Amino acid sequence: MTRKYDLKKIRNFSIIAHIDHGKSTLADRLLETTQTVAKRDMQEQLLDDMDLERERGITIKAHPVTMYYTSADGDVYQINFIDTPGHVDFSYEVSRSLSACEGALLVVDSVQGVQAQTLANVHLALDKGLEVIPVINKIDLPAADPESIKRQIKEIIHIDPSKAILTSAKTGQGIHEVLEEIVYSLPPPKEPEDSILRALVFDSHYDTYRGVMVYVRVISGTITKKTMIRLMATQKEFEVQEVGIFCPREKPTEELYPGEVGYVLANIKKPSDIKIGDTMTATLKPASEPLPGFKQITPVVFAAIYPVDASDFEALTDALNKLRLNDSALTVEPETSLILGTGFRCGFLGLLHLEIVFERLQREFDLDILTTAPSVRYRVHMATGKMVEIETPSHFPDPSVVDFVEEPWVKCNILTPADYLGSIMSLAHDKRGELVNTETIDGERLYLHLKMPLNEVITDFNDKLKSITQGYASFDYEHDSYIESDIIKLEVKVNDEPIDAFSNLVHRSKAEFKGRAMCKRLLDVIPRQMFKVPIQAAIGGKIIARETLSAMSKNVTAKCYGGDITRKRKLWDKQKKGKKKMKEFGKVSIPQEAFIEILKTDNS
């Protein structure tokens, strides 16, 4: 079937929204109104096809879909919608999706108002020069206050709210107005300068039978079956076997034209051949230079992933390679531990990103795995003038050769009702944070700008913030710089033997608290021995916390009935000498279950 193509009638857009502001429901209504999906096939959160996305009510992956809409003046428009995640950890996904669009819908909940993460993503869109249309959703709720939300949009985001569309994605109210606004307010794609093929690779996923499916936005030229293509970052060449669009499932077409969003299948078997943000061009008449991509986001949180059963190592390797294909922000390097065996040190964009990867490995690939406690990347400046970057305590050099250590700090933006200011400042102080400045919004809400060490943010900052503000505050963070800090290696010793797997890199002010907590936890999980076992936390040679695991004791005098006390004393002395000798030569073998238990409680 030949499609009618008109560049002026194409609109490419994304939806920017905070988690739970109704983005996926609005997408469902748009698909329903444009009859892209038949009513009988309709289900909630249609584009969120992972079980994980449905359960948590969040979007993790970008999903493109092509809709055809007949406007009020009778013209048919091709509207390409790229669904984007809303969480701060997936800003990389958002950045990629926005690079393939000319406009965005800014969806704000009419009760909750503008949230910090919405703000972060809308600035991404404005920086890329996108046209932003404000949409106020959930106006059917009794507590809805659209006028207050319009003021927030004007004061916080500095966008004219007069054109804001009032909608209820649940009931379908205002959906036609949204579609009309997309058609008339968003610009069509730019006219291509020439006919040389340039297509932006903004996503991909692995199909077991057909290889890698590459998601592209065509900027100039066309892609057809049998086209010989070249991927400019890897210089790999392939022959196109199929092109198509998403409606919302894959639908093969004859050709992909400039301005269109679709997929390309070219028998690409190796996930490593595809680099997200790359430019696809033709082999015969290639582009001289790649398209300006989006910035490569570097991971900020690191954790090691190990298979519980060593025989699952190959399966874990294969699973991580497949995950990396449609999650290019994930970095993977092999790592070996004396106790946990062979695994991988992985880099993530944040704690939610780590959780999602962990759950996907367990669910989609049926793997039994464990992760170490999350850490960040420190810069260690040696006395020789050399600088090394480390993420694990085992790589931390001897303090005598270290000049100073720098840790990453982030800019934190918190939107909160004014009543919780005192509690938030107290929490920020506990986390070594510094207040930069405060903005007052509509007399009731505050916009706080803080600077904090990333190490403190990734542990439990979000949970504690939600707890002390009863869920009303929202926050996002972006990287600021590396700042010199008093970071030390906290060693854990069991029976005077250092155990690397339990070591931590911490700020000196938090070392004693963390040391005590770790010793107490180990006391519960290490099995009792025939002799007393000291469990210690140490900084260098100085012990800062200690617990003692009591010995298993046998009643050696049980067989003595009556008689002189000296007989019992002889037996007790003999037992005492035996225990002393055992302590000198005895080794405490910590079972793997104890390590798994500690790592699990560390992550919970």
Image: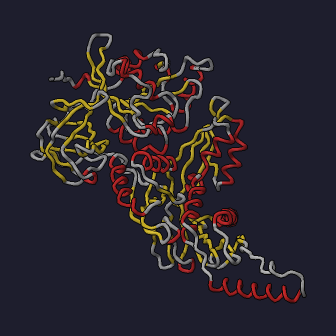
Q: Residue at x 44, y 24 (%)?
A: 26
Vertical order, 588 against 247 (above or below): below
Closest to the observer, 529 or 255: 529
Q: Position of residue 448 (x, y in %)?
A: 62, 42
Place residue 214 in its image quadrant.
top left
Place residue 493 in its image quadrant.
bottom right
Q: Is residue 272 left or right of residue 442?
A: left
Viewer can see residue 118: no
Q: Position of residue 540 (x, y in %)?
A: 62, 77
Quarter of the N terminus within the rendering: top left
Q: Residue at x 45, y 32 (%)?
A: 16
Closest to the observer, 54 or 572: 572
Residue furthest to the left in view is 284
Vertical order, 532 against 426 (above or below): below
Closest to the observer, 3 or 308: 308
Q: Is residue 357 left or right of residue 183?
A: right
Vertical order, 454 against 494 (above or below): above
Q: Position of residue 413 (x, y in %)?
A: 57, 43
Q: Residue at x 78, y 77 (%)?
A: 555
Vertical order, 194 against 572 (above or below): above
Residue furthest to the top in view is 73
Viewer can see residue 472: yes
Q: Position of residue 436 (x, y in %)?
A: 61, 48
Q: Residue at x 59, y 39 (%)?
A: 474
Q: Is residue 101 left or right of residue 596?
A: left
